[in-house]
Image: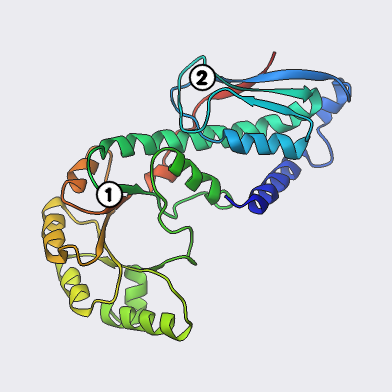
Amino acid sequence: MQTDILRDFILRSINEDVGDGDHSSLACIPVYAEGKASLLIKDTGILAGTEIAKEVFNVVDKDLICDILIHDGEKIEHGNIAFTVSGRQQSILKSERLVLNILQRMSGIATTTNKYAMRLSGLKTRILDTRKTTPGIRFLEKEAVRIGGGFNHRTGLFDMIMLKDNHIFYAGGIEKAIKKTQEYLKSNKIDLKIEIEARNIDDVQTILSIGGIDRIMLDNFNLEDTRTAIRMINGRYETESSGGITLDTLRDYAECGVDFISVGALTHQIKSLDMSLNAV
């Protein structure tokens, strides 16, 4: 994770919350009063975001001391104390909500991802996230996926070519979409992988006849067509299943032999884990 991006995010988030002052704390807490608080876990899952929390405390007040007791990626359950923070009481209170918002959401994503990753135990298939993320905090959500045992698809529009149905339609078909993309990359001296979406077996055959790509996405394929497509591709290109795949059907698709399964629900259909930062 890039330090400058994280720091900028923290500063913007603090400014959004504090505005011209944390008047609740300023009104009743002495400036130099010191204290301690602990992160109490009230849920079960996978912890994610403690390293981010440490950076929030550091940005708010470099004299705050955060002692991590449970690390990112470790299992947590109700009653656990994940970390303590000590220092100026006003600084702890200023940090509280941002720290909790980050930890609760990241831990929810890591927990959900871990459930999917565990379903693939023993198989070659890897679970991927998507770009179905919250604007402005994609980098945190994708980090949470990694912590939970998943893998990141492309970060954004800039780091991989992904030709989906609308690209193919606007380009004038699969062949034109692929060839225009190859020409674009060559003329601009850009080195990016090319993934293209197939909506049916005929699309797979067309893509195979053209070639020049790196991965084929099997979009909303049923299990029978997925098996057929995998046999057709026969290891020539990476394969990815996507669309409508749930926790219950995940392993069935993986057993078809696909390299990747992408699931938007990892980041946009999650339940944040319950936790609180309590003064002690």
- Which of these two is toward me, 164 or 256? 256
Report whether 249 appears left or right of 271: left
Tag 1–tag 2 contact (CB < 8 Å): no
| Amino acid on which the number 1 mark rests in the picture | Gly
x and y percentages locating residue 266 in the rendered image:
40, 43
Q: Secondary structure at mark 1?
A: loop
Report whether 69 appears left or right of 26: left
Q: What residue is drawn where x is 87% and y is 24%? A: 27
Q: Is residue 101 above or below residue 166?
A: above
Q: What residue is drawn where x is 69% and y is 48%? A: 7
Report whether 124 appears left or right of 182: left
* Residue occupied by mark 1: 244
- Mark 2, other Cα within 10 Å: few <14 / some 14–19 / many ≥20: some
x and y percentages locating residue 127 in the rendered image:
33, 47
Q: What residue is drawn where x is 53% and y is 24%? A: 70
Report whether 97 appears left or right of 107: right
> In the rendered image, which quarter contains the C terminus?
top right
- Which of these two is toward me, 167 or 140? 140
Q: What is the CA distance from the residue labelled 1 to the residue labelled 2?
A: 31 Å
Circle count:
2
Q: Nearer the viewer, mark 1 or mark 2?
A: 2
Q: Secondary structure at mark 2?
A: loop
- Mark 1, other Cα within 10 Å: few <14 / some 14–19 / many ≥20: some
x and y percentages locating residue 250 in the rendered image:
24, 43
Where residue 23 sits, quadrant-wise, is top right
x and y percentages locating residue 158 in the rendered image:
49, 67
Where residue 91 sits, quadrant-wise, is top right
* Residue occupied by mark 2: 42
Q: Which mark is residue 258?
A: none
| Among the two numbered marks 1 and 2 on one chain, the one whose residue lies closer to the N terminus | 2
| Amino acid on which the number 2 mark rests in the picture | Lys
